[in-house]
Image: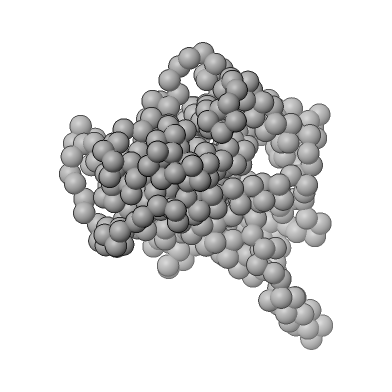
Amino acid sequence: MKDDLATTRTADEERSHVPLLKKLGPGLITGAADDDPSGIATYSQAGAQYGYGLLWSVFFTTPLMIGIQIISARIGRVTGHGLAANIRERFPKPVLYFIVGLLLVANTVNIAADLGAMGDALVLIVGGNSSIYIVFFALVSLTLQIFIPFPRYAPILKWLTLALFAYVGAVLVVHTPGAAVTATLIPRVVFDHDYISMLVAVLGTTISPYLFFWQASQEVEEQRATPGHEPLMQAPGQAREHLDRIKTDTYVGMMFSNLIALCIMLTTAATLHVAGITQIDSAAQAAEALRPLAGEFAFVLFAAGIVGTGLLAVPVLAGSAAYAVAESFRWPIGLGLPLAEARGFYFILTAATVLGVAIDLSGIDSMKALLWAAIVNGVVSVPIMVIMMVLAGDPARMGPFVVKRRLKFLGWLATAVMTAAVGAMFVLM
């Protein structure tokens, strides 16, 4: 017994000296992937159309986003399975197939929008053909996911999060008045359909279903890739280490994510909205519109950020769809498995990416579909969040690690907010 206590104290001391960067992984990557090119377009449109009128939504959603993402991560780490596998075991099959089907459709449209924005942004910076760039980015994404082992691939995703600092640089070179602070802290809600629809789109972009599936599955990936690590239901002695890491990782990742969203809204509100440009159809259009208003440097930062964050987001979108479908049918899953051992998983990942490319090359206006995809994400989030909260409070799935008190409150509050916003949108229609 004394040896066990000594071992525990030694482990605690070692954890206290782990550098912050080492504690960051799934949460940081998930948060950064939330600010994908399609998200940038949504935040840009919110800033251009309503100025500072929706800044409060970013500030308000931060604790809600933190709470629900911690819950998704805990489900993955505690059970050793992703969300789809847990839904499969707990709910009827029609519920599982309905949720996964909607996720697959929304993710594929988002992939198309992201690849299209990346291609357009690179054309703005260096010239050339957008279609060629779209195919190139898709091939790069698929090559990294299929042929690079997960322990080597995960750090690549982590470093790609640095691309988002471009938007911190962009907001620093434009003038933002003190009114922006007031608008961030004091909500002024306008009860008309367009405003509420944009609010639902912002909420759906910020609190997105694919983020739930990705972070839960990444916790499973990391657990399986690390010798000696087991699901917490089987190894409760590892709980303190991993639950503390999940908390730190998610706090940093979601706060970073919403800081970038705030910077994007501020930049477009202080430039485009002030100049009377209130309609933005793509992230690349937002970058181009910034050029005469904020200067060449802000334009380059904004456009380069679209490419960088897209390289991070496309794998997350395709990967979360692959995790969900593969778990639904009990296929071998994981970026840590070679192609020969997880053909179904990699087929879905490839199919989602290829379909995204096909949407772009077909001439379909993926950016118009994007806002609807964000709204769909907001609508779909509601049942998924209810399901997650049921799973997180189920002793049969979570054992002694069921969510309690503050985390349960944040999770249900986030669910209630999404439900209210979606309900208001339908009422005002």
Quadrant (top left/top right/bottom left/bottom right) for the C terminus: top left
Q: Nearer the viewer, residue 427 or 145?
A: 145
319 relative to 380 in the view: left or right: right
Q: Is residue 379 visible?
A: no
Q: Nearer the viewer, residue 307 or 100?
A: 307
The colour scheme applied to this rendered structure is one colour
Residue visible at 44% across and 44% down in the picture: 295
Quadrant (top left/top right/bottom left/bottom right) for the N terminus: bottom right
Residue visible at 60% across and 22% down in the picture: 128
Q: Nearer the viewer, residue 220 or 205?
A: 205
Q: Position of residue 202 (x, y in %)?
A: 37, 44
Q: Position of residue 289 (x, y in %)?
A: 40, 35
Q: Position of residue 52 (x, y in %)?
A: 29, 51
Residue visible at 73% across and 57% down in the picture: 230
Residue 308 falls in image quadrant:
top right
Q: Count of labels shown?
A: 0
201 relative to 170 in the view: left or right: left
Residue visible at 27% across and 45% down in the picture: 274
Q: Is residue 156 visible?
A: yes
Looking at the image, is 39 positioned above or below residue 246? above
Residue 175 falls in image quadrant:
bottom left
Q: Position of residue 91 (x, y in %)?
A: 49, 40
127 relative to 94 in the view: left or right: right
